[in-house]
Image: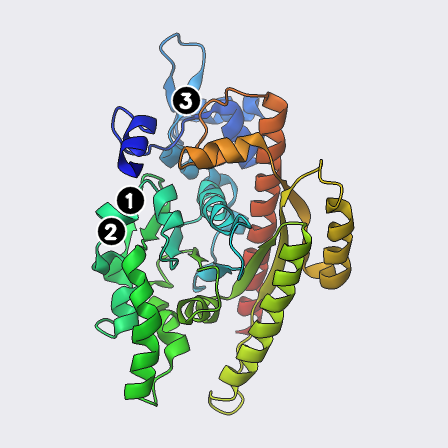
Amino acid sequence: MVEQIRSRLLAPEARKISPLYSASQIATLCGVDKAHVNYRISKGDLPSGKLTPTGGKREFTLAEARQWTRTYRMEKMRPAGQRAICIAVANFKGGVSKTTSAMILAQGLSLRGHRVLAIDTDPQGSLTTLHGVLPEAEVTEEMTISPLCHGTSGDITPAIRSTYWDGIDLVAAAPFLFNAEFSLPARQMNAPGSRFWDVLNQGLEPVRDLYDVIVIDTPPALSYVTINGLWAADGIVVPVPPSGLDFASSAQFWSLLADLGGNLDSQEQAGVRKIFDFLHVLLSRVDQADAASPAVRQWIQATYGEFVLPVEIPKTSVTSNKAAEFATVYDVQKYDGSAKTYKRAVDAYDRFVDLIEESVVEAWRARRGAS
């Protein structure tokens, strides 16, 4: 049934394709006005896109848009000698927009010129599905982190596949990844000197020079795979909807993570501790019509303070409609609903991506200063 739905939504090719971009969108991404884009096109040193059949507008492919953004946003690109910044999007509770946030982050950063590796570590394979790949039918074991977890490989490179979205490569997930929850502790029992929490981190070593950002979508549980995702990360983003249950769950997340971190740090070499470059709490699925929402938002702000990102992701019909189509707001070519509602959603996601990019750039700057 899922395959039939996908074929119907993505007809005629039954594969996702990235949207086209107007000259105005290119100008916004590059931080210039449309007249400057037209001037630069006349110089001929950047992609000029194609005129629509009527000849009235110019359209650019995603690959062309990325050439423009890399040219105009050089100060935010990965400095020479620096490695990829790895971001884990995590929460122990499902339904908090964790996967959507990870996908938006990957798409938004790539659209801004960065090369991104998206890693799906959730056996449900939702991030994989958003890339237009069916976990049950199209994902094999070598396309996932499974070989790392089983110990048959120490390099994630063979699992990486290109995607429909220029600038994003994918390590997929599928239901059989549940087996990792048994193979990781089994390896620890059979080889007490091994470090079950560091398997993914070590597997990423060969590719950290090939990407600018690595985005990991983790399972909604404190599992062995989640621990690997967190320990491979340089930064953590935790989406939290402003509801009482989600707020309580997020408190448990940080408490368990702190306890776990202390235990794992004690097993490392003397003086070696896990340090994150940044920790961010993202207010997600914010429903302005929910009477309890303002109070919970105050609790979250009072609890997490400066760790709360200064943006709220609204719960809108735009995001729910796109989710039903195995897509995000960044996949939209033309939205049929309210333009105001669509703009509100896109503006919030753009702000979210910009804030995370600032943290990534700052992490590179700090590392360059330390070296």
Residue drawn where x is 45% and y is 10% of the image: 56
| Disc 2 target residue | 139
Q: Quadrant of the N terminus?
A: top left
- Does 230 appear above or below 192? above
Q: Amino acid at mark 3?
A: Glu
Q: Earlier in the sequence, mark 2 or mark 1?
A: 1
Q: How far across and down, in percent of the image, does residue 298 sit? A: 78, 53
Q: Is residue 251 left or right of residue 80?
A: right
Mark-to-mark CA distance, 2 and 3: 33 Å
Marker disc for residue 134: 1
> Which residue is nearer to you in this view: 109 or 334?
334
Q: How far across and down, in percent of the image, does residue 84 sit? A: 43, 61
Q: Amino acid at mark 2?
A: Val
Q: How far across and down, in percent of the image, does residue 128 sit? A: 35, 48
Task: Tell me the element at label 1.
Answer: loop
Mark-to-mark CA distance, 3 and 1: 30 Å
- Does 109 appear above or below 23? below
Q: Amino acid at mark 1?
A: Leu
Q: Is residue 305 left or right of residue 21?
A: right
> Which residue is nearer to you in this view: 100 or 348?
100
Task: Tell me the element at label 3.
Answer: strand
Can residue 154 be seen here? no
> Which residue is nearer to you in this view: 118 or 98?
98
Q: Nearer the viewer, mark 2 or mark 3?
A: 2
Q: Earlier in the sequence, mark 3 or mark 1?
A: 3
Residue most extreme to the bottom = 270
Residue drawn where x is 56% and y is 46% of the image: 353
| Disc 3 target residue | 59
